[in-house]
Structure formats: structure tokens, C-alpha cells
Amino acid sequence: MAGGASKSCAVPPAGTRLINVALAGNANVGKSVIFTQLTGVSQTIGNWPGKTVEKKEGYLTFKGNQFNIVDLPGIYSLSTYSMEEIVSRQYIVSDDVDVIINVVDASNLERNLFFTFQLLELGIPVVLAVNQMDVLRARGMELDLAVLEDAMKVPAIPVVAVHGRGVHELLEEVIQMVQDGDFQRHRVAPNGFVRHDHADAAVATAVDPRRLKQRYQPPDRSAILSFGKEVEERVAIIAGAVSSAGRVAALPYPARFVAEKLLEGDEEIVPAIKAAPGGAAVIERVESARKELEDLHGEDISTVISAEIYNRIHGLVDRVLTTRPPDKKGRRRAAVLDALDHLTTHSFWGYVILGLVLYGTYTFTFSIGDLLGGLLDELFGTWSGSIYVAFGEENPYVLIFWNGAMGGFIGAVGGVLVYVVPFFIVIEILQDSGYLPRAAFMLDRFMHVIGVHGKAIIPMILGFGCNVPACAGCRIMETYREKKIALALSSLVPCAAVLVVVMGLVGRYLGAGWVAFLFAVNFVVIVAVGRLLNKVMPGQCTELIMEMHEYRKPNTAVILKQTWARTKEFVFKSIPMIVAIGVAMEVLLMFRLLDPFNIVLSPITVAWLGLPLITGVFLVYGVLRKELTLVLLEVLAASMGFAIVDILTPLQMLVFCMVTMLYVPCVATVVVMARESGWRYALKVALLEIAIALAIGGALNWIGTLLMLA
Amino acid sequence: MGRSMERDAHPLYLSDAANGKRLRICRVDAGMQAKRRLANLGLVPGVVVRKKQAAPMHGPVVIEVRGSILAIGRGIASKIVVVDEVE
């Protein structure tokens, strides 16, 4: 934790100044860990306005300064190939941010600095957070930060994010930068950790950080940033043409950056320049320059430019990084990691391990969930007994507040939360340790059969716990097309709530064979829908290009905080909703207001699906939360003094479960899906799933009926 | 790089190279989008990579490039032309 830093709310107290900081960098470099260390539980997760990109924001006060910190999505470049890149680029250059903290992975410096170079091209205030210094040392490598700072002319702070080391110093550096508006040289302590004399930093001088961007004069970085002669000449000519015509004014980027992106055919900058007066001439010049360069190098322009940047970085990394032969401990560590990596991606043992991991996830989730859920049910039963004795079983207040509100609450906690939390913990461990990308690698081939690449397995595994985080997780897919397919498939994965219904009804009364049958049908539907969407959507399935970071020991604090962040939403948004529904249900039942629903739905439920009349309204409630279908069935049975077997025939149980499994993702899932892909698509998916559920449910009913007659 | 840039009659593709081999990238024949993404990740002509692994049943391949590990779908890997890099 950032020790002295205290958390506070969004409004800065009087007398403090507000500093806006953005955390930027590649995926998997520990950005989120630093963000969590800085902001703790004050973080909020939302979306960028009008975009389907996640925006994580948090606050803290430190040495009399109020920091507003935004965690940008993990990206590899500042081009416009993905929504994340566009959002990040526009935010980074906007006046909403004063200083960028660029988090880089010291143990993967070359690739990480590619992004840093693009930040420097933007000529904005950057502080480098060099994370994973401990991993670097464990590998027997030494990083000369002083040389790195000198070459790139950016302050570089060594950080070990998981232990919170260097996090303080980052903030001090940001304060320093806001005050000086310039890059300062540092003394590097022998242990590699920077020590500053920041005594005066606390005594904030009346500087308006809002104007840092205007005041900020980037140091001359031409020595490190300039390209080879051929490219540099042309970039300079285009930059000159762009800025002399004053066309760059409308764009928040420096002329040189605009020139480079024009050459690369940037989707934001090219149209903007084209539309400007005289822009056509500039574009013409760009086109001819691009053609010359492509002919000269025999490669397309983005490859040429990327290669030049990488050449620079390669030279720099050579100078700052020294590799000693690792000591005995380092060698053992490398051997263990290598063996683990080899084993988990082995063409036979890899699948065995994958199977064990999936099985283990299930066993862990359900043994803990069943245990806690059972205890809660027992408690509720005992309490109910005493309450009925004290106030009478037919007392309307008891019905509303105890059966309805408390019953709903216990149902939500004991039926869902106790399963969801352990599942999230396992997923976080798998994610944090680096296993999930390996699973994606192993399953890539299979996932292509259903129209997506291996990465989609990550949200889909999440879907077994709950479709809501699964759909939110679909943002890891690179293209919009794949994200949409992954969303539809994730929403079809049988979630924990569905499992509760299936196990509680078919599993309990008809046996495991029929459970397997239902899951097999669900699986076939997923494959079919994947193939269908892949056919009807324009474009084609993109291939996997995914980073597989080294295995690492999962950090308990990070796992618990992430689990809490995921659980928070369920606790504060879903549980109140479930309680409200519980109360509403009791009221509706009391005044017999349900019957109209049942009548309206009867052509579908009774005539087509062959279900009892009363189930119509259960299916309506199931849209809110799927496990309600079973819960309500049990409530009804109990209230009439029947067992479920008296209400439903075995065939009806099968049909009821099948429809519950497929008919529509729950409301929360639809909402998240809409947030990720727009309402149109989310509703289309919902309608498609209703159609599928009715078709298969109806078929099951009619085939079953015919077989029984025969 | 002279020799490696030549387009010989039987190019060696990343997908077909043996595991554990050090290889130099000659060219990437994939689509524009994939090419850009690979370039951003440091996979540009001239760079030396090490093929670590290939998933069975025509699955993706794993390479080490510039100190990071990438998994690349077999479709793209079969469009990346490489030559053996002498140790």
C-alpha cells in the first residue's frame, strides 16, 4: 500500500490541488496492481462516454494533493486499430490529464518501450514506472536506470508493484513534474531505488496543474526518437507541410506525430487532414512518400516504421540491460518455470492438466458453495420456525418481510453468492498466475470450430460462474466482430444459477444422465450459434495473436481486491433487486395477480411446451434471475403442500430446465451485453435465444409425448 | 540479411519449423491488420525469434520474440517466412 496516502472521495478538500494522472502501458505489466495499490477500494468501474471500453477511475490524497487516477486499457501501440487505442490516445492528449504514468515491465523492456516511444512522440509529461524489478533481478539481469533516463529524458522510477514498493516515489515524481514542468535528473540510490529530496513538495506552491500541458516544454529527444535517414526526411517534409498550413491546429497532436500517422494511414488523422482546406495536397504528398518508402524497403509502411522504432529500442536496451549468468537460485527458478510452461502446454499432459483445472474449479466452487448454502438454508429454516411461532404463519407482514424480503436475500446469498465468490477467486488465481492464456492456447483449435479464437475461452469459462462477468470479459477480444460472437456464446454458457436449477430439478429427480443430456444439447447449441454467427457476420474469424506472460505466484491481496471489485456489483446491485422481487412476488401471490401473466403466456407454455399453466410467470421471473424459476416452483409446491414431482411430470421437468437453460440470458447479462455491443445487438441475441429455446423445448415436448404414446 | 530476404522456391514457414529452433523472420505474408499487430509486438523482418512449441491438431505456435512470449494462430504462422539462424 502507498503507506501515507489516505483515500478520500472525488471532491478535493479546500486548499488542495487536483492532479489528474493516467496509467498507461501494455497489458499484463502490473498496471492494475499499481492502480489498486494507489486507489484501494475507492475505484469505480464504468465505461468511457459513448464507448464500450471500460474506464477505471479512483482517487487518493497524498502530501496535500488530490490525485484523480484513471487506469487506461492495456494497449501495445497508439494507433487506431482498436477502440481501446483510440480512447487511450484521445484521453492522453486531452486537457483532462496532467501527467501520464507509463507502466513498463522491466523483464520485458524491449516490447514495452515500443509504447513508451509513442508516448514520447506525443511530447507530453511522462513518468516511467519500471515494474517487476524483482523479476528482473531473479533472472540475473541488471537495469541501469540512470542511463535509461538520460537517453529517453524521462524520469524512471523502479517499482515492485505487488509489494507496493516505489509507488510512493511515483506520486512524488508526478508532483515534482507538475511543479517544475520539466524532467529532472535524479540520484539513484545504490539499491536501485530512487531517493528524492522532496521536503518542499508538500508545501505546494500555487501552481495550476491544469496548465501543465501548456507550460510543458518537452526536452529535445530527437537523438532517440528520430528515424533512419529515408523515413526521417519524409516525415520532416510532411510535418512541415502540415504545420505550416496550420492544419495541425485542430488536432491535439504534434506535427511530427501527425506526419508519422498520416504515413501509416491513421483512421482518425487522415480524414481530419483530408477535410481541412488544402488537405488533399498534403495527402497526395503523403501517398507518394509512402510509396517511395515501401519501394525502398520492400515492406509496407507500418512494418518499416515499427522496425525502425524497434531498432532504436534494441540499441538502447543493449546499453541499459546487463545479463549476468544467473546464480543457482535463478537457474532453478528458470528451470521450474520452463518445466511448468512445457508441461501445461504439452500436447498430451497439457490437456490432462486443463481437464483437472476445470474439474478442480468446479469441485472447489461447488463444495464451498454447497457447504455455505446448506448452512444458510438450515439457519433460515430454524429462524422461520421461530418467526412463524411468534407471529403466525399467515400474517401478511411475515409473508412480505420474512418470506419475501429475507427469503429473497437468503436465496441470493445462499443460492448464488456462495458459489460466485469462490469461483471468482479461482478465476483470479488462474488469470494472475498466467494459466488462462495457456488454456486459450491449448483450446485455440477447438474454439475455431465455434467461430472464435482461443482467447474466447477466458470469458466463456467465466460464464460457468455467471454470464455477467463473462460478457464484461469479452472486451479482451481484439475485433468488434469477435467480441460480438464471444458475447453471444458467453451468454449461452450455462451459469451457476442454471446449474442450480438443472441439478435441483432434473439432477435430483431424474438422475445424472439427463443432466448430461441437457448440457450436451446446450453445448450443441453453442457450437451451432457460433458457426451461424460466423457465417452471417461480415468479415472472417481473426487469428490468435496473444501474449503469454511468464508464470508467477499469484498475489493474495490483488486476488482478494479483484474478487471484491467483481462481487461488489452483485452485492449492491443484484441483491437489492432480488429482495425487491421477493417482496413483489409475495404481494402478487397474496392478491393472486399472477394469473393474467399465465393466461397470456399459455399458448406458449401450455400448448407448445406442454408445461403447467403456473410456470408461465416463473419463466418471466427467470429473466430477472434464472434460479428464480426453481426457487418459485419450490415456493409454490411448498405453499400448496405438494412436492415438485406432484406438479411436474419428468418430461415437463426436462422441458422446463431446457427452456430455462437457453431461453434468454438474464436481465443483468443483457444489460452488460448492451454495454459492450449496443442494445440492438443485445436484443437480437436475446430474441435469437428465445427462438432457440422455444424450438428445442417444443421439440423435446412433442418428441417426448410421441415416444410415450408409442 | 541479404540471403534471407531472397524469395527462394521452397520457403520455410514458421508453422513448419522445428520446435526449439532459432529463426530469423524474412517476411510476413499475412493480411494488413495481422501484419500491423505483429509489427507492433516487435515481429518485423530481420528479428530473430525462437520457436518454443506448437499446439496439436493444427493449433497455434508459441514463439519467443524480443524477450516476450507470443502465441500465434497457425493460419498466420503459415504465412511467416523464416530462415534458420546459425547459433
Image (cartoon, rainbow, N blue to C red):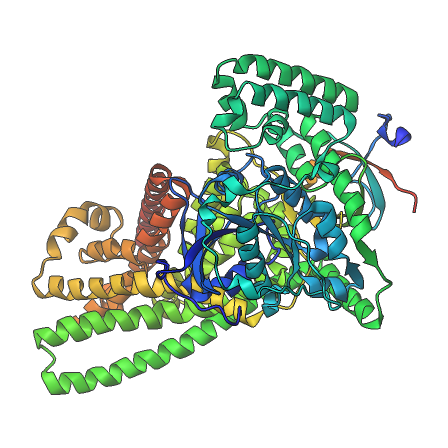
Image coords of residue B75 (percent x, y): 68, 37
- Left or right: residue A420 versus residue A647 is right
Above or below residue A401? Residue A252 is above
**Total marks in image:** 0
| Residue farthest along the right direction in this orientation | B86
Asked which quadrant contains residue A173, the reply is bottom right
Where in the figure is residue A536, as x and y percent of width and height?
Answer: 46, 31
**Residue A143 shows in the view:** yes
**Residue in the picture at 18% in, 49% down:** A602
Q: Position of residue A656 (x, y in %)?
A: 30, 56
Q: Does residue A493 appear anywhere in the picture?
A: no
Residue appearing at x 61%, y 42% in the figure: A119
Instruction: Looking at the picture, tell me which residue is in the foreground, A487 or A302.
Output: A302
Q: Is residue A595 left or right of residue A167?
A: left
In the drawing, does residue B74 fall left or right of residue A62?
right
- The image quadrant of residue A627 is bottom left
The x and y percentages for residue B65 are 75, 46
Task: Examine the image and state in which quarter residue A434 appears.
Answer: bottom right
Viewer-side residue, A613 vs A47? A47
Q: Is residue A447 left or right of residue A491?
A: right
